[in-house]
Image (cartoon, grey):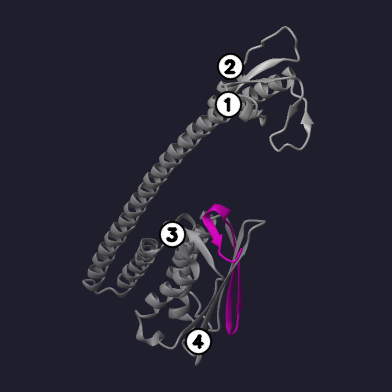
Amino acid sequence: MLYILHLLLSGYNILSPSPNHFTLNIEQAIFFGFFKIQSTSNQIEFDDKWVAADGSNNIFFSFPITVLVFFAFIGVLIGLLVVYYWNRILKKILKRKKETELQLKALLLEVKKSDEDKKVLLQEIHHRVKNNLQIVSSMLNMQANSIEDRTTKLALNEAKERIQTIALVHNKIYKSPTIGEVDLRDYTQSLFEDLKSQDPLNSNVQLSVDASSLKIAMDSLVPLALILNELYSNSLKHAFIQQDNPLITVKFGWEPTSETLHFIYKDNGTWKKAKKQDSFGTTLIDIFTEQIDGEYTLNNKKEETKYGFKFKISSQNIVDSNT
């Protein structure tokens, strides 16, 4: 480009006042596509009509064409400068964007590591709580074994079972992949197996659980687990004395629009009439039902006992994997 500008500006001289006569050097003549064989010097004189380089036709060469070429060159030069300027700006923008992305990635890694540390810490807390509850349960068991009074021994064993129920909650949370949430179906089955294993006479009792894919937070699970513990214990101890095919059925249903958890518990046994001291379990069911803003109905038939619970639970404390 600079060479072309040099050709346009250097050696361009008007030899006479006539606008139809001027001089170009040889390089300029070649650049514009003209030649004249008669010249032997480094200057070629042109009139206002010239022979084209291919010798085809006469053409007219005048001052305005040169001016247009000059300004066209200036325009191209300015365009190149603008492109170069914007290219530098875009490079700076891309560099800043890349630096920002790297900072965000580093921040995300830091947050992820912090979340993992918190998860490990919470799991460790639940693990230690579970261990402490097991210690308390073992102490109650030792105390019960040292007492000869049957009524006191039975009360201590029931207290031990309730503590083990809470310990199982913490154990499930400790092992859960999502901290703070427990699979309701898995917990319901595990609690039943723990209580069932304590008495060989209950080995033939079966459990049917329909809990869909519900996961529940600890705040709501603990009182629900204690209600389940009382119901299981009552069924295993009092319902299946003369039942060949004992069956307990548990069903959970979640209504997200009304934030209501439906819980149905029933067995196919015939319950013995509760004694006065057995009313403590019923009192606990009432207390824990009220704790999670619930209500229940009880329907006793000859060969079926059925509880129907409704709990108001925030959607933040329960997750349905099917929705």
Q: Residue at x 45, y 40 (%)?
A: 98
Q: Nearer the viewer, residue 282 or 209?
A: 209
Q: Which mark is residue 178?
A: 3
Q: Is residue 76 above or below residue 192?
A: above
Distance of mark 4 from mark 2, alpha carbons?
Answer: 117 Å
Of mark 3 and mark 4, the one earlier in the sequence is 3
- The mark that comes first in sequence, 4 or 1, is 1
Q: Is residue 37 magenta?
A: no
Callout 2: few (<14), some (14-19), or many (20+) C-alpha neighbours within 10 Å? Answer: some
Instruction: Report crowding for label 1: few under 14, some 14 to 19, many 20 or more residues within 10 A (C-alpha).
Output: some
Residue 313, magenta (yes or no): yes
- The answer to which quarter of the image holds residue 201 is bottom left
Is the Cβ of the residue at disc 3 closer than 8 Å to that at disc 4?
no
* Label number found at residue 11: 2
- Helix, strand or loop at label 1? It is helix
Query: Is 218 displayed left or right of 33 in the figure?
Result: left
